[in-house]
Image (cartoon, rainbow, N blue to C red):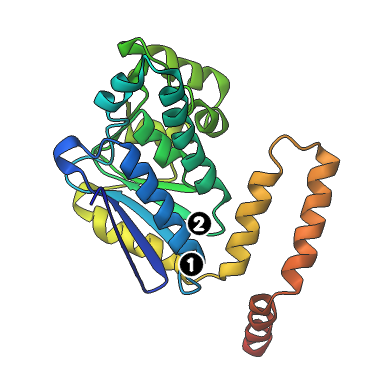
Amino acid sequence: MSIEYAAAGCVARITLNRPDKRNAITGEMMSALGDALHTAGDDTNVRVLLIRGAGKDFCAGLDLSEVLKSAEDEPSSIASARRLGDLYIAMRRHPKPIISAVQGRALGGGAGIATASDLIVAAESAQFGYPEVKLGFIPAIVTTMLRRAVNERQAMELALTGEPLSASRAHAIGLINRVYPEAEFDDSVERYVRALAEHSATAMSLSKRLLYETDGMSFEASIEAGVQANVQARRTDDFKRGVERFLKKR
């Protein structure tokens, strides 16, 4: 199995499972990830998704042997690239928060999986990079998320140099959310994920959708989208129960 999937305690855990290949992304892995996202989306008990890599690395990017095979066949190339693009879109459209926990290297398409997630936490030793330029290739699909995560000059430098980023540098430029000491990484990830899983599923879903929907909107349109989301949130059972608990405490 190229991935492992397990759901328990409101958390769906997806593990990229090709450790002998540094969890390089194949077509089969993309399909399996899509299926796992769909399963988690339909599971009413799941509030948060966690993606990790088996072994020492998170993900080394696309399996280059597959990419090379399709290089001379345009329909195959388009199908392969579009499958990866569709995976990133599915992650952004997913109704529940997705967290990538990165140990070791997250490179190319693997950095894309992390960047397409809603939140990224990393071990101090983690590295992020877009080394495609060193192979005469480009981080074409990943660029969409990268450009939204960091400023234009930082994205340009990452794409043109292909140099890796340390976890601390990735955090400093806003690419990732948290950095944890290596020895405490697993426990820290669990605490982070469990804390999120305690929050309202509807509130998190509405927040995620609103944040991404307002990309490219005018100021006025963004405010109006916020108004509509505000009204929708007021109608949820989670909001009503939350307010009742708050008022009882007072």
Do callouts 2 and 1 mark residues in contact (Cβ within 8 Å)?
Answer: yes
Which quarter of the figure has residue 249? bottom right
Above or below: residue 74 compared with residue 198: above
Residue 158 as seen in the image, left or right of residue 68: right
Residue identifier under label 2: 97
- Of label 2 and label 1, which has the lower sequence position? 1
Which quarter of the figure has residue 115? top left
Under tag 1, what secondary structure?
Answer: loop
Q: Is residue 175 visible?
A: no
Residue 54 as seen in the image, left or right of residue 42: left
Q: Position of residue 10 (x, y in %)?
A: 42, 71
Above or below: residue 9 compared with residue 41: below
- Across the whole image, how many numbered discs are drawn on residues? 2
Q: Residues within 10 Å of mark 2 (few under 14, many from 20)?
A: many
Name the quarter where the C terminus is drawn.
bottom right
Q: Nearer the viewer, residue 217 or 24?
A: 24
Above or below: residue 70 compared with residue 216: above
Residue 226 as seen in the image, left or right of residue 95: right
Residue identifier under label 1: 47
Q: Position of residue 42 (x, y in %)?
A: 50, 66
Residue that appears at 49% across and 32% down: 82
